[in-house]
Image (cartoon, rainbow, N blue to C red):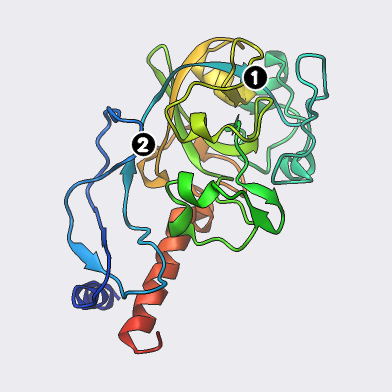
Amino acid sequence: MFKGIIALVFFTLTLAGAHAQLDAAAIASGPSLTGKPRVSAGGPRVSAPSGAHPANPFTRYRYPWKKNITATIFWIGEKPTARNPTPNCASSWDTKWAINYGGYDDPNPAARINYRPKAFTPKLNPFYIALPYNDRINWKEHKPEASKVIPWFKAMNPKPGKTVLKGRWLQIVHNNRVCYAQWEDCGPFLTDDWRYVFGNSQPANPHNSQAGIDISPAVRDYLKIRSGDKVHWRFIHFKDVPHGPWALYGTNNPFIHPEQDPDLRAQQRYMRYLREVRDGKR
């Protein structure tokens, strides 16, 4: 198997076309000094055939930090209020979010244990967040800018209307504590603020001290944070996420179900594509 993969990689070195870069080294921990994700240095240059072809999902990025962002708390099953008019029984990508989670993610500290509700074992990862961008217009169509502003969009090669955001991992820092969580909903308030989420702008949301990220009770408790506190956050590849309490629960959690890692799925598709090129099927 290993020799077959090596043979495929060397095969692609002879193909004409645009180059994409592989990087087997670990991502450095420092933030980017620019607003754009940085491609990791090093690794062989791999060619792909000219014309339509998938982007190389082995390319890895060091994503820039979003610094001093106001965080607010939200939870699965939350009812609408004057300060938060959107109920959280469904998410932007899961119409049965609360059901699939297993129930109400009670934020009351007295009702929680080990970063989860006492009443039940969650069926989804309790370490979840929301950011104010949705890549879909509906279940059949992406927003026109999505393929241009989302760094991993082309590598995911999604079907029309299938999100490439759900389940993505973030690294979140507050007062020297570092937490990891999955992107599972859109907000606070906005779903079109790509200039902040993927660009250099500050959050466009005018409410709650310009809040730019919603965090779950588990993230709140791990970071020892209150609603309205400031955090730093950035996107991170799953393979760079260390083990922790965010690795324990959830059918959506690649620590438990490796097939849930979207990068792994994209890499498997890309290797199938290379085999087809090698075998003259493309």
Earlier in the chain: of badge 1 and badge 2, it is 2
The residue lying toward the viewer, choosing from 132 and 230, is: 132
Q: Mark 2: which amino acid?
A: Tyr
Residue furthest to the front in view is: 144
Q: Quadrant of residue 206?
A: top right
Side of 197 relative to 101 (left or right): left
Q: Mark 1: which amino acid?
A: Ile
Q: What residue does disc 1 label?
A: 73
The residue lying toward the viewer, choosing from 238 and 59, is: 59
Q: Nearer the viewer, mark 1 or mark 2?
A: 2
Q: Where residue 63 is drawn, which disc sits there?
A: 2
Q: CA distance from mark 1 to mark 2?
A: 24 Å
User: Helix, strand, or loop for circle 2?
Assistant: loop
User: Helix, strand, or loop for circle 1?
Assistant: strand
Q: Residues within 10 Å of mark 2 (few under 14, many from 20)?
A: many
Side of 162 relative to 281 (left or right): right
Q: Position of residue 75 (x, y in %)?
A: 70, 26
